[in-house]
Image (spheres, grey):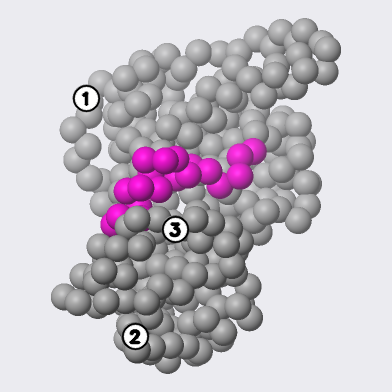
Amino acid sequence: MTTSARILVTPRSLTAEPHPDVERLRANGFDIIYSRPGATPTEEELVALVPDCVGWLAGVEPVTPRVVEAAGNLRVISRNGVGVDNLPVDMLAKKGVKVMIAEGANALGVAELTLGLIFSALRAIPLADAGIKAGNWPRIRGIEIRSRTVGIIGCGAIGREIARMVIALGAKVIAYDPLRPNLDLPSSGFEYAEIDDIISRAEILSLHCPLPKDGSAIIDRKRLYSTRPGLVLVNTARARLVDEDALIDALNDGQLGCYATDVFEPEPPVSLRLAGHQRVIATSHIGGFTAESVERATRIAADNLLSALQG
């Protein structure tokens, strides 16, 4: 086997144990190089592993310019997900490295977790659970989702799935997406609007969009303080979509009723200032971490590599 036929595999879920869709790359003439099992590779490890690889099945590990410079033979990076925030996309494009994503693979998993976070916030499920386990009997009056106004920012595969789910539960959706795709949803339960209009009207707001190109927060201090008091804000997209300092102030002031999130910056969080807040419901970036989502994403990522390297 020549070094020109190597593929690097780094997602934690795929290095912990061999996956059939990764291993089938061997049957197509490639040598598979795994990073440390079950661990996010460091910059030093990536610099050591990537030089002879023509393909890379990548996870959420940060890919620095130094790593890209070391990747002299690399032709394609195939993500086992849809985000590319961890990749220096412009630099890769200049080097002629193709970036591919597993489009739609984790949409249902993330949408279902988003719905779970919404219900956890509306019914204070984590607080009730913790209280009972502490020997208490907390009774926190919740609210029902039916007839609530749910704002959705971003109507890609995940956002549109959430829209369908909450409308089926009797909620009304107001959504923002620059492309305004036709989601084939009833006009009585769905409408498009601008972001500021959504923020001022929504009782529940869910984020499903990429970061702006300048990396700025979409939900900044001004927008946080223009929401309806007690808003439930759900973020299963990207931590930096929300201004963290302003978010903590809004939680402390009671302007926000709850922040339910699956994403942090960095991950895992080095401080519990946000994650440990009593008005925060936190999960550990598990939106797409279902058996079904992992299978779909791995299959698509492997197919993308074969298409790019053999097509």
The residue lying at 60 percent from left, 13 percent from top is 142
Amino acid at dot 3: Pro
Q: Quadrant of residue 58?
A: bottom left
Does residue 153 appear in the picture of this structure?
A: no
Tell me the SS state at disc 2: loop
The residue lying at 26 percent from left, 69 percent from top is 27
Q: Which residue is mark 3?
A: 18
Say if mark 2 contacts mark 1, CB within 8 Å.
Answer: no
**Left-right relation of 268 to 71:** right
Instruction: Depth check: give the residue in front, 283 or 26.
Output: 26
Q: Which residue is mark 2?
A: 1
Residue 134 % position (x, y): 82, 18
**166 versus 289 height, above or below:** above
Spatial CA distance of label 3 from label 2 is 20 Å
Amino acid at dot 1: Pro
**250 versus 14 height, above or below:** above
Badge 3: residue crowd in 10 Å (few <14, some 14–19, many ≥20): few
Residue 87 % position (x, y): 47, 71
Q: Which residue is mark 1?
A: 186
Spatial CA distance of label 2 from label 1 is 57 Å
Front label number (2 vs 1): 2
Direction left: furthest residue: 311
Give the residues drawn in magenta, as a range.
282-300
The residue lying at 47 percent from left, 88 percent from top is 51
Q: Earlier in the sequence, mark 3 or mark 2?
A: 2
